[in-house]
Structures are given as structure tokens and as C-alpha cells.
Image (tube, rainbow, N blue to C red):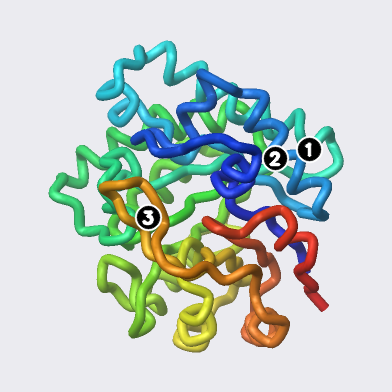
């Protein structure tokens, strides 16, 4: 059993940073990189055994629309790995965050999927960014908040073509009915990842905690499950804020059930702070 970190945005907000821009935490890679490093370190100090980078929102498509040059994007992607590596200080493994196409749209599409984009456009979106992140030599690749099986198929094919030996996990964003946010069966989404030779885990992130157990029960996996839910609020893409009453951490019986259902890596996503990770018991 291993403890993953929590929501990077949450740790940054607790440090007084305002994250309402379309690049979310990614903007701080240019304006306040040390804040990102300190937020990562807060999770290390809280006992997290895997730390995930700040690359989620960084892409050539999304950043160019905000005035970034290609060089700016490349530098930010490399820096995102450097910062998480420095925070980990060799004590815990690091994963680079690979967000979905929808994240670059900055309109909440990662919680809907089924983009109005061709498969070739989505492939092009991921290809160069993925290559750069692989070349930073992290311990793991974190394909996260993935709403759509079709996009994951593209990503795992790109990973296979890269011939990298870096293990990866896929975490889907999901909804009621044991479905991905794009409306596909979670069991089919899991089966796709289990077929991939480089996959180390499959699971769910940025999804309400009460939905986790039904999703896990719906699927059979030959891989360990990875689970890092959000605090159960709803994302407002217009205001770039979570709305609703947050849960502080997860109930012990919830975590115990996730473990019984095959979860071996457990952490949190948006709304889950370093203090929540510190209190989490994986026994």
C-alpha cells in the first residue's frame, strides 16, 4: 500500500496563491516556481510516497493561446519535473502529470469528454508534450483525469511507440453509473489499460469519493487500482472554482473498502490538502 499526494492546487491556495487563470497551477511555473516546489514538499512532509508534478495544464495548444512561445512551454514542462524532483530530494518517487486534451480548453471538458476534435488533433496535442516529459526521466507517467477511452487509446499507443521503459498509470474521471465522464463503462476503460505492457496501475481521480467503491466493484483488473478522489465538490469552469461543501479527507471505512476492492495506491485530488494526506491511514 502506498500513499499518493493530494491536490497541488489546494496546497498552493493554502499558501496564499490565487489560481483563477486558465492555466491554473501551470501559470506559477513562470511566475512563482518556488511556490510549486514548496507545495510539493508539503506533501512529502505529510508522508506521501509518490509525488506528482505540475505539468497537468501545460500544453502547446493551451499555452500558445495565453501568449506563451513554444520555448516557454518546453521550459515549463522540464521545470515541472525539476521542481517535483527537488522537492522529493531522492526520498520518494516522482510522477509527471499528463492531463487530457480537455484541460487545455479551460472549460471543464475534462469532466465531460467527447471533445469536438478529431483523433489526429488529439494525438498531435499529446505527442510532443509526452516526448518532452518522458525525456525528463521521471519514475512514473501519470495519465490522469482522463474522461474518455478514445483519448487513452491514443496516449498508450504514443507511449508504446516511444519505447520508454517508464511505468505509467491511467486514472479516469468518472460519474454515476460506473461510467467514465464520456459515458463509457468503467469496466471497459480498465480492461484497455490492463492490456498495456507498461501499465503499473489503473483507477480513478478527481471524482467524488462516494462514487469510488461502486466504480471499483464494477470492474475486474489484473493491475492494482489507484484511487485519488477530489473533495466531492463541483467544478465551475467559468469562475475557475470548486463549488459546494468540501469533505475534509476521506472516512476510514471508505479507504478500507477501497483497499478491499484492490486499491494499492491511494491519495487525493482537488480539495485534499497535505494535512488530509497526513491523517490518511492505509492499514
Residue at figure coordinates x 46%, y 80% from the top left: 211
Find the distance from the CA under tag 2 to the CA under tag 1. 8 Å
Q: Which residue is mark 1?
A: 88
Q: Nearer the viewer, residue 132 or 279?
A: 279
Q: Residues within 10 Å of mark 3 (few under 14, many from 20)?
A: many
Location of residue 83 in the rendering, given as x and y in whole percent from the top left corner: 67, 28
Mark 3 vs mark 2, CA separation in Å: 26 Å
- The answer to which of marks 3 and 2 sits earlier in the sequence is 2
- Residue at the extreme right: 91
In x, y percent, where is residue 144? 48, 53
Tell me which numbered mark, 2 or 1, is placed earlier along the sequence.
Answer: 2
State the SS at label 1: helix
Q: Secondary structure at mark 3?
A: helix
**Badge 3 or badge 1: first in the primary sequence:** 1
Q: Which mark is residue 152?
A: 3
- Mark 1 neighbour density, 10 Å: few (under 14) some (14–19) many (20 or more): many
**Residue drawn at point x = 51 percent, y = 88 percent:** 217
Q: Would you say the residues marked 3 and 1 are in contact, meaning their CB atoms lie under 8 Å apart?
A: no
Task: Tell me what residue is drawn at x 62 percent, y 85 percent.
Answer: 261
CA gap between label 3 and label 1 equals: 28 Å
Tell us which disc is closer to us: 3 or 2.
Answer: 2
Residue placed most toward the observer, 60 or 166: 60
Which quadrant holds residue 103?
top left
Looking at the picture, does residue 61 appear above or below residue 103? above
Comparing labels 3 and 1, the label whose residue is closer to the camera: 1
Q: Position of residue 257 (x, y in %)?
A: 65, 87
Q: Are marks 3 and 2 in contact (CB under 8 Å)?
A: no
Checking the image for residue 40, the label placed there is 2
Residue density around tag 2, few if under 14, some if 14–19, many if 20 or more, within 10 Å: many
Q: Quadrant of residue 225?
A: bottom right
Q: Nearer the viewer, residue 41 or 194?
A: 41
Proximity of marks 2 and 1: CB atoms separated by less than 8 Å: yes
Amino acid at each position: 500500500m502506498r500513499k499518493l499526494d493530494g491536490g497541488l492546487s489546494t496546497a498552493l491556495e493554502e499558501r496564499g496563491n490565487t489560481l483563477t487563470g486558465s492555466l491554473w497551477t501551470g501559470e506559477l511555473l513562470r511566475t512563482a516556481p518556488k511556490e510549486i516546489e514548496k507545495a510539493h514538499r508539503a506533501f512529502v512532509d505529510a508522508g506521501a510516497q509518490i509525488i506528482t508534478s505540475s505539468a497537468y495544464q501545460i500544453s502547446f495548444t493551451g499555452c500558445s493561446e495565453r501568449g506563451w512561445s513554444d520555448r516557454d512551454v518546453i521550459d515549463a514542462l522540464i521545470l515541472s519535473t525539476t521542481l517535483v524532483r527537488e522537492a522529493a530530494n531522492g526520498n520518494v518517487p516522482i510522477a509527471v502529470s499528463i492531463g487530457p486534451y480537455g484541460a487545455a480548453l479551460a472549460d471543464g471538458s475534462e469532466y465531460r469528454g467527447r471533445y469536438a476534435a478529431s483523433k489526429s488533433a488529439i494525438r498531435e496535442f499529446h505527442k510532443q508534450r509526452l516526448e518532452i516529459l518522458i525525456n525528463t526521466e521521471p519514475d512514473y507517467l501519470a495519465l490522469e483525469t482522463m474522461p474518455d477511452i478514445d483519448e487513452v487509446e491514443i496516449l498508450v499507443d504514443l507511449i508504446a511507440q516511444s519505447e520508454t521503459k517508464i511505468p505509467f498509470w491511467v486514472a479516469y474521471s468518472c460519474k454515476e453509473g460506473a461510467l467514465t465522464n464520456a459515458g463509457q463503462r468503467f469496466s471497459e476503460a480498465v480492461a484497455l489499460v490492463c492490456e498495456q505492457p507498461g501499465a503499473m496501475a489503473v483507477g480513478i481521480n478527481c471524482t467524488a469519493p462516494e462514487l469510488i467503491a461502486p466504480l471499483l466493484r464494477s470492474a475486474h483488473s489484473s493491475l492494482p487500482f489507484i484511487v485519488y478522489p477530489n473533495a466531492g465538490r463541483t467544478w465551475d469552469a467559468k469562475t475557475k472554482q470548486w463549488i459546494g461543501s468540501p469533505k475534509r479527507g476521506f472516512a476510514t471505512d471508505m479507504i478500507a473498502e477501497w483497499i478491499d476492492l484492490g486499491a494499492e495506491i491511494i491519495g487525493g485530488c482537488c480539495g485534499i490538502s497535505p494535512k488530509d494526506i497526513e491523517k490518511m491511514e492505509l492499514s
